[in-house]
Amino acid sequence: MKRRFEIESLLTAVAIAVPLTTNAEPAAALSPEQQEADYRVIAARCGTPAYEKAFFKQSKAVVAAGLVSRTRPPAEVEKTVTALRRSPFVLVAAPADCAAQLKQLDALRSTRNALLKSSPGARKAAAR
């Protein structure tokens, strides 16, 4: 339980410290589900198809491990994340912004890799 709180605190700190866009609302005002949906949209808009697929797979693993929302079932959170996807043009106004966005997503991916390796919920989700 303590580790999950530490993981959520770390993810929240990263999300607040590294807002992905300048056009969207501040990251602190977004729900974790909305942030996750935005991450997926940015990966699809800026990344290659292989990058998008890898990011989406990791994102689903994070949701399944309960790292996005610990109070709701992962299946319900996944449905909410899917429903909250916004237009990519709202999140990334110009293709020139993609390099910075991808750099931030890469930092998020590396942080999440470490969290998924240490999370017992991730091990259960991977076993399914």
Image (spheres, rainbow, N blue to C red):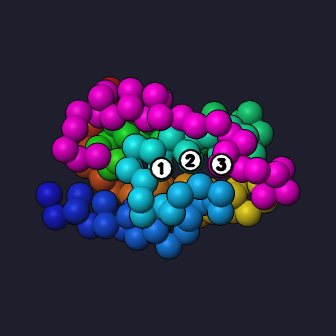
Circles 2 and 3 in contact, beta carbons < 8 Å: no
Mark 2–mark 3 Cα distance, whole angstroms, equals 9 Å
Residue at figure coordinates x 32%, y 42% from the top left: 65
Identify residue for label 2: 39
Q: CA distance from mark 2 to mark 1?
A: 6 Å
Decide which of tag 3 and tag 1 comes sooner along the chain.
Answer: 1
Q: Residue at x 23, y 33 (%)?
A: 73
Is 85 a magenta residue?
Answer: yes
- The residue at the point 29 percent across, 34 percent down is 74
The quadrant the C terminus occupies is: top left
In the displayed structure, 15 sits above or below 74; it is below
Which quarter shows the N terminus?
bottom left
User: Mark 2 or mark 3: which is in front?
Assistant: 3
Name the spot of residue 7 as percent of width and height, x first: 31, 62
> Measuring 68% from the left and 40% from the top, which residue is drawn there?
88
SS class, disc 1: helix
Dot 3: element: helix
**Mark closest to the chain's N terminus, 2 or 3:** 2
Amino acid at pointer 1: Gln
Q: Is residue 97 left or right of residue 5?
A: right
Locate residue 33, reporting x and y percent: 40, 43
Mark 3 to mark 1 CA distance (whole Å): 11 Å
- The answer to whether residue 99 is left or right of residue 36 is right
Picture disc at residue 35? 1
Q: Which residues are magenta?
A: 69-97
Q: Return the residue at label 3.
A: 91
Marks 1 and 2: in contact by CB < 8 Å? yes
Crowding at mark 2 (Cα within 10 Å: few <14, some 14-19, many 20+)? many
| Rendered image: mark on residue 11 | none
Name the spot of residue 95 as percent of width and height, x first.
83, 50
Question: Which residue reaches farthest left?
Answer: 1
